[in-house]
Amino acid sequence: MVSPMNIELSSDDLRRMPSNLSASLVNWLQYERLKPSYPPSKPQFQSDAEQLTLTLVASGRELRKSRISSNHAHVRLSQLFDAGFTKSGMAVRVRLTQEVAKKHGHDYVTKGLSISSKGTVIYNGQEFDKPSPLAKQINSSAVNGWEYIEVMKGGQWVCLDDLRKIWRKAS
């Protein structure tokens, strides 16, 4: 029988980790294995198959301070890439506004879009490290690119805003 392993990490420990490691850890816990709500009422994650218990130890004050500072930070597409949330060559699509979609007869633009080796999105030869300017260029009006741009991850389309939220929790 495998004996359980208990790892306790404070929010300070997570901040001292390389950002790609802490992001990968939180991503793994949330999406690949455990799918908890974050932060849970008791910050403890368990996976019976691996006999792993991970306890995130943080005071309410630390969590609030962490959420405030990371929620207001500007996130770039290259940061999601560096943390492993996106990959070079990953499929990208941009949702069109109702008006533009009606005019063109389709809801999304996929042609000419790709993630570069730096994690930026390339559209018709132009490089974007922020999603809103890209979504604005495609829609010919200002829209929230975090909500209008999606990437194919794990066989399904995932909104960049969802990836940004995960990244912020891990940072």
Image (cartoon, rainbow, N blue to C red):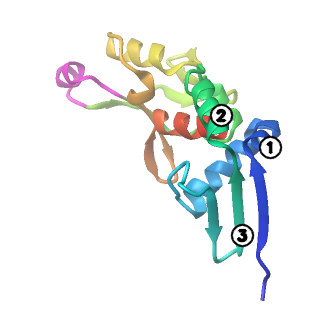
- Residue type of the residue flagged with mark 3: Leu
- Is residue 59 within the magenta segment? no
Which sits earlier in the primary sequence, circle 2 or circle 1? 1
Q: Residue 161: where, in percent of width, then height?
A: 47, 33
Q: Quadrant of the C terminus?
A: top right
Which sits earlier in the primary sequence, circle 2 or circle 3? 3
Is residue 111 something one can see in this rendering?
no
Asked if the residues shown at circle 2 and circle 3 are in contact, with their CB atoms under 8 angstroms apart, the answer is no
Which residue shows up at 78% across the image and 39% down it? 12
Which residue shows up at 65% across the image and 40% down it? 170
Which residue shows up at 55% across the image and 48% down it? 39
- Residue type of the residue flagged with mark 1: Asp
- Residue type of the residue flagged with mark 2: Phe
Residue at mark 1 to residue at mark 3: CA–CA distance: 18 Å
Give the residues drawn in magenta, as a range. Answer: 95-106
Q: Residue 169: where, in percent of width, then height?
A: 60, 39
Which residue has dot 3 on it? Answer: 52
Mark 1, other Cα within 10 Å: few <14 / some 14–19 / many ≥20: few
Image disc number at residue 81: 2
Which sits earlier in the primary sequence, circle 1 or circle 3? 1
User: What secondary structure is marked by label 1?
Assistant: helix
Residue at mark 2 to residue at mark 3: CA–CA distance: 28 Å
Which residue has dot 1 on it? Answer: 13
Q: Residue 46: where, in percent of width, then height?
A: 63, 68
Which corner quadrant of the image does residue 157 belong to? top left
Q: Quadrant of the N terminus?
A: bottom right
Which is in the foreground here, disc 2 or disc 3? Answer: 3
Which corner quadrant of the image does residue 167 belong to? top right
Is residue 103 something one can see in this rendering?
yes
